[in-house]
Amino acid sequence: MVVEGAVAERLLDDFRLLLGAGVELVGVDRERLADPVGEGGLGAHGTVDDPGRQKGLRPTGGVGAVGTRPVRPETDPYRGAFAERSRTPRMEFAAFAERAERLAAEPADIETTRLVADLLAAAGGRGKSDDLATVTRFLLGRVFPAHDTRTLDVGPALCREAIARAAGPNVGAADVEERLAEAGEIGAVAAGFDFGGQRGLAAFGEGRDRLTVAAVDAALRELAADAGDGSESRKRDALFGLFNRCEPAEAKLLARLVLGEMRLGVGEGTVRDAIAEAFLAEASADDGKEGNDGDDPTLRARDEAAAAVERALQVTNDYGRVAVLARDEGLAGLRAEGLAVGRPVQAMLAQAGTATDAVEAFGEVAVETKFDGARVQVHYVPESAAEGGEGLGPRVYSRNMDDVTDALPEVVEYVEARVSVPVILDGEVVAVDDDGDPLPFQEVLRRFRRKHDVDRMREEVGLRLHAFDCLHADGEDLLDEPLRARHDLLVDVLPDAAASVEFADDPEAIEVAEAAALDAGHEGVMLKNPDAAYTPGDRGRDWLKRKPDVETLDAVVVGAEWGEGRRAELFGTFLLGVGAGDDEFATIGKVATGLTDEALADLTERLKPHVVSEDGTEIEIRPEAVLEVGYEEIQTSPTYSSGYALRFPRFVGVRDDKSVGDADSLERVARLAGDGAE
DNA sequence: GCTGACTGCCC
DNA sequence: ATTCTGC
DNA sequence: GCAGAATGGGCAGTCAGC
């Protein structure tokens, strides 16, 4: 292998990055760079975290004639990783990757849960090193817990660039994209390159120095903290440095972790059960032995443990923390976690359902308007009501527990003016016009997470809070109270402003209410079980949402994209157009859901012969097929050439009876959009 | 200072 | 958000 | 029935590059 000129320059550059930005290379010569795999290859040991030797960035001599010395340690992006050292051995990232691989291969839920429990125990069993919180989060594709506002700000593009760079001088971002189109999944692409283990600089010298879970975590946290000029390239560099130290299996997991898509078949429910199994099984067994000689005490205890874990998760939103809590303090510790004003709780969610479903299930049904806005949770401790301590000005959280207070001054003022006891309220923020009538969802988006010009936008788009539930009032937690009671308290707490509820016990009455809600410009109705408790994070059958039946459009397929994961071999997305005269089609959106695997395979086969051109994952297709596409609403679009887009598009069927000339026209779409806005 | 690409997060 | 799929 | 996976449109914010 001969490397020269610009490529050698880049290798040198990369090597510096590999060691960390605060390191300057001394004594590197081009002769050696030209032969990185030969005897004179560069040794990288002693340059990155090395818990055993604690050498950090000091020069080591090493195999090659390379010395390093710290230049600006305070700006070293890996500093946190080094600082994370502990005397106890840490779980190696490779070990995590290997177990993850086994998890992904395991189809049976029960066995998966057991494997996750084993992994958690290995990461932080009593007396061992403490990677438990980190591993728990990693399993779910997270670096930070849900309530944490920090983000990596690394997406697919940056990740691909970092991979390309780690893959060597002959690999560009375009190559990575090409492989992605083939492999259908970024982890497989990363694993396919073999960077760190064999080719990478770190492979030489006496034994590779291996990544630990803690080091990856620390590096990603540092990366997340970076912002401002040059941050994008520093993030790319930091990622490059990590990838360069990865074996294929590690690279796969790292790429997925960074993008938050682990694809392990392990979700929150599995982790929840695994936490209980790993750390509370003992406690449960004890319970069984000592007190209960009833039927199946083990089972009962296990349910109890799972319930305790679940409740702790609902109120803390931190899987890592809950895992540690379960291990260190057991059931009692978990149960000590309760609601706290100022700490967001997961929102209760709803499933689709009809009026008949609701009546059959609940008898009497609580019917509320379903507002088309953004879900919010409001926490407030009035100054006057604060016992001894200070009050807490109203804080507003999004459904994912981001703090959105600053963007929503109306909500703050509204609550401040009316509420006189500590509360946690649940509700929806909608955009309204000067008459107080609801505006389209897009208007809410213009306000919701705004940081700049909030006051100016406030004049343009008004907001209104519709509070519909109350989780805490005046010192009382209400999660376990029935909806009826919670709503009564809501009315007490927000006298003139709580969203109204109407009780109905027959489908006809519900339909009348639904028609009225739609007439007033709302999305539909919520049908709730009046006797149900508030179950945070649960998408159960106690809350049903009822929206109008979908409308459909017959649109022409004018393009497609290769799918990912399960759909790697197939088109995953179809670009749609509507007739715009003269055999021209104006695009109006894409469909990707609603297709069964079979329909997708058929369509892929059928359309392949009509592919006009391919660019990465993007495919242009000659207009040939007509699809019936369901949608919720037609909205104006800055993205598509028709000027419109479908909201919530889904595949309904293929219109084999229609030729492209018979598909719906832009004219018709414009008319429908106009009707919808009326 | 402007624009476009990207990211995260609403639905 | 919606939808399909495997358990 | 549930959890997980694979996907939709659009907005604000941020950063890079001109």
Image: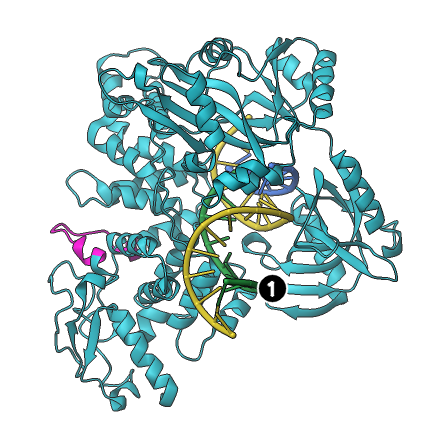
Chain colours: A cyan, B green, C blue, D yellow
Residue at 36%, 62% in the rendered image: A231
Q: Is residue A303 magenta?
A: no
- The residue closer to the viewer here, A584 or A545, is A584
Residue at 54%, 60% in the rendered image: A184
Residue A321 percent across, percent down from the top left: 28, 36
The C terminus of chain A sits in image quarter: top right
Say which chain tag 1 marks. Answer: A
Quadrant in which residue A443 is drawn: top right
Horizontal placement of A100 versus A487: left or right? left
Residue A349 percent across, percent down from the top left: 52, 27
Residue A101 percent across, percent down from the top left: 39, 53
Q: Which residues are magenta?
A: A80-95
Q: Amino acid at mark 1?
A: Thr
**Badge 1, how many Cα within 10 Å: few under 14, some, many 20+?**
some
Horizontal placement of A673 versus A117: left or right? right
State whether residue A192 is above or below residue A650. below
Quadrant in which residue A44 is drawn: bottom left
Helix, strand or loop under label 1 = loop
- The residue closer to the viewer here, A441 or A146, is A441
Residue at 19%, 61% in the rendered image: A74
- The residue closer to the viewer here, A239 or A360, is A239
Residue A263: in sight, yes or no?
A: no
Which residue, given by chain and number where applicable, does mark 1 sit on?
A617
Residue A609 percent across, percent down from the top left: 76, 66
